Amino acid sequence: MNADTVAVAATPFAYPFAPGRTALVVIDMQRDFIEPGGFGASLGNDVTRLHGAIGAIAALLAAWRARGWPIVHTRECHRGDLSDCPPAKRLRGGPSLRIGDPGPMGRVLIAGEPGASIIPALAPQGGEIVVDKPGKGMFYATGLHETLQARGVTHLVFTGVTTEVCVQTSMREANDRGYECLLVEDGTESYFPEFKAATLAMIAAQGAIVGWHAPSAALLEALVPA
Ligand code: TIU
């Protein structure tokens, strides 16, 4: 541990948390994935499986806000003209609604539509970074790396959905860019419990080849007082 880091009990070994230089990342906690009638449900998923992550994310948001530390919210969504949605993404599979189709929460996965908004319980506040991303990873076509570098961010704590799709892709992208990454076990969920378990195992394997994972309680315990 460096002098300016705090040890968080984590898997596969202690995570060197850097107070003030660590952004809390909340991936895609949007109505389109969490509520019935949206993109997640259109793919045939039981959206209630994702609800378990909300409490831990809310607690971490409160802790970060109390300390004035950087927060990133992402939203997977596309422009209304679909110019940033590759046909391969829109046409693959047999969803009941495709990206851009009108649904109960407006056009599916389109920026500005009700379904693309973040659920009210985790709504972003002023000054927090909000990134609309056309891909699964948060760095692809977003400029986020430059924004984080300008803020002096070196460490990222990941939460959100789904563990093995947008969260894992974003964490792998972050690892390649040199960030020290921690995934919060109870702050992420998947439509497939076995995929969540496999993701946690594979990121921490081989000496934290992608990063660490820990429960939110271990992280909150280690935070310096607000
Ligand atoms: N389908 C699925 O599990 N996830 C996504 O399509 N996007 C995100 O993970 N946000």
Image (tube, rainbow, N blue to C red):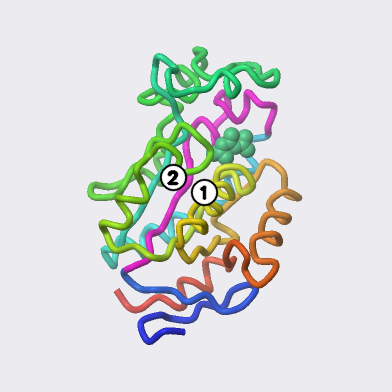
The C terminus, quarter of image:
bottom left
The reply to whether the magenta stretch includes residue 181 is: no
**In the image as oriented, which residue stretches furthest toward the left?**
127
Horizontally, is 74 left or right of 193 in the view?
A: left
The location of residue 135, given as percent across then percent down, is: 50, 35
Ligand 1 contact, mark 2 (Cβ < 8 Å): no
Q: Residues within 10 Å of mark 2 (few under 14, many from 20)?
A: many
Residue at 45%, 62% in the rendered image: 179
| Residue 55 marker | none
Of the residues under marks 2 and 1, which one precedes in the sequence? 2
The three-letter amino acid code for the residue at tag 1 is Ser
**Ligand 1 falls in quadrant:** top right
User: Is the Cβ of the residue at disc 2 closer than 8 Å to that at disc 1?
Assistant: yes
Give the secondary structure at mark 2.
Answer: loop
| Residue 139 marker | 2
Give the secondary structure at mark 1.
Answer: helix
Horizontally, is 120 left or right of 88 in the view?
A: left
Ligand 1 contact, mark 1 (Cβ < 8 Å): no
The three-letter amino acid code for the residue at tag 2 is Phe
In this rendering, is residue 150 above or below 75? below
Question: What are the residue bounds of the magenta stretch?
Answer: 21-45
Residue 59 quadrant: bottom left
The location of residue 106, given as percent across then percent down, is: 45, 18
Q: Nearer the viewer, residue 191 or 7?
A: 7
Residue at 43%, 53% in the rendered image: 25
Q: Nearer the viewer, residue 50 or 17?
A: 17
Residue beneath disc 1: 170
Whole-number angstrom distance, CA of label 2 to CA of label 1: 7 Å
The reply to whether the magenta stretch includes residue 42 is: yes
